[in-house]
Amino acid sequence: MERTLIILKPDAVQRHLVGKIISRFEEKGFQVTGLKMTRITEAMARKHYAVHEGKDFFKPLIRYISSGPLIVMVLKGKDAIEVARKMMGSTFGSKAESGTIRGDYAVSTRFNLVHGSDSPETAEKEISIFFKKEELFDYNLNDLQWIYDMSMGDIV
Ligand code: IDP
Ligand code: MG
């Protein structure tokens, strides 16, 4: 099982899409292990998007992501990182495939509603930026044996 950090960016909050986007991830079968509304300071944003420092879109990206309250959540599931990014669609709203979150709800190249970690290393780093240990919950999901076939001992 893998963990990923998902952010519903300030445009998702302003556009009343929080419930819809969370539902998509829940309905897919992911377990929500942490969830809150917060704001990110410019310093946190710079840390979170450090890989983009120096690029032409860095400054407006920092302004965008720190411009209002957002939702951060940690999802747990098999291949959660890759599957969540697939559900989000490609970066630019105008290019994202229909059926994905960005493809269905975004047209902008910057205001693209969601963030999802892109590797296990970045996921762990990003989770530690936004969540304290006591804000994350380890609990049994009752229907897990219907989300995956675990009858042979592994998770399929
Ligand atoms: P990702 O969110 O799909 O992983 P990244 O390349 O990591 O995409 O870019 C981070 C964020 O920066 C994007 O989600 C988007 O909001 C913004 N962004 C990326 N490229 C551009 C661009 O060319 N113009 C404007 N904004 C951009
Ligand atoms: Mg990225």
Image (tube, rainbow, N blue to C red):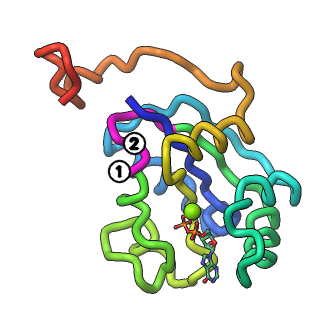
Query: In the rendered image of this protein, does residue 49 appear above or below residue 109?
Result: above
* Residue shown at the point (57%, 82%) measured from the top left: 109
* Residue shown at the point (41%, 15%) measured from the top left: 140
Which amino acid, by three-letter code, is at mark 1?
Val
Is residue 76 highlighted in magenta?
yes
SS category of the residue bearing label 2 = helix
The residue under label 1 is 83
Quadrant that contains the C terminus: top left
Residue at mark 2 to residue at mark 1: CA–CA distance: 5 Å
Which quadrant of the frame does ligand 2 lie within? Answer: bottom right
Q: Nearer the viewer, residue 26 or 112?
A: 112
Q: Nearer the viewer, residue 98 or 78?
A: 78
Q: Residues within 10 Å of mark 1 (few under 14, many from 20)?
A: some
Q: Which residues are magenta?
A: 75-83
> Quadrant of residue 45 in the image?
bottom right
Residue 7 place in picture, x, y as percent = 61, 53
Query: In the rendered image of this protein, does residue 78 appear above or below residue 44?
Result: above
For the residues labelled 2 and 1, say whether their Cβ atoms are less than 8 Å apart: yes
Query: In the rendered image of this protein, does residue 133 appear above or below residue 111?
Result: above
In the displayed structure image, the side of residue 143 where residue 31 appears, left or right:
right
The residue under label 2 is 80
> Quadrant of residue 61 in the image?
bottom right
Residue 85 place in picture, x, y as percent = 42, 57
